[in-house]
Image (tube, rainbow, N blue to C red):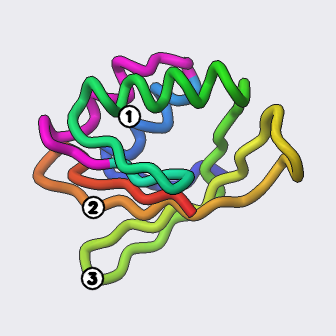
Amino acid sequence: MPISLPKPIASYFAAEEAGDARALARCFTGVGVVRDEGGTFTGRAAIARWNADARAKYHHTVVPLSATESDGVIVVLARVAGEFPGSPVELEHFFTLHGEEIASLEIR
């Protein structure tokens, strides 16, 4: 059963599925922030590089499984599979939105 996601988050996962790092980065505000694997990536150009580099390294897929919202944070549990030890894993994606764009994402 498909899960209901706010438009910018649905667009993020659609761009992830398409392997389109630039489209994924456009889901964020101009000063959007991603925190993943101990790194912080700020701005659309850095976010596009982060996603392209991760895709080249891990050849991964991300499938959203569920979503909850609390105190302005949307938490999406997603199955991530790729070329890394322990694959597949379920990771939480913590999104905050600003209007119709993603302000921040933390993956853990």
- Marks 1/3: CA distance? 22 Å
Q: Is residue 37 left or right of residue 88?
A: left
Secondary structure beneath dot 2 equals: strand
Q: Give the label on residue 11, or none.
A: 1
Q: Looking at this view, name the residue that lies furthest to the front.
A: 38
Badge 3 element: loop
Mark 3 crowd level (few <14, some 14–19, many ≥20, 10 Å Cα): few
Question: How far apart in space, not on screen, are marks 1 and 2 (Cα)?
Answer: 14 Å
Q: Residue at x 27, y 61 (%)?
A: 96
Specify the segment rendered in magenta: 18-33
Residue on which disc 3 sits: 71
Q: CA distance from mark 2 to mark 3?
A: 10 Å
- The residue carrying pointer 1 sits among few (fewer than 14), some (14 to 19) or many (20 or more) residues within 10 Å by Cα, namely some
Decide which of tag 1 and tag 3 comes sooner along the chain.
1
Instruction: Look at discs 1 and 2 and give the one toward the viewer.
Output: 2
Q: Which mark is residue 96?
A: 2
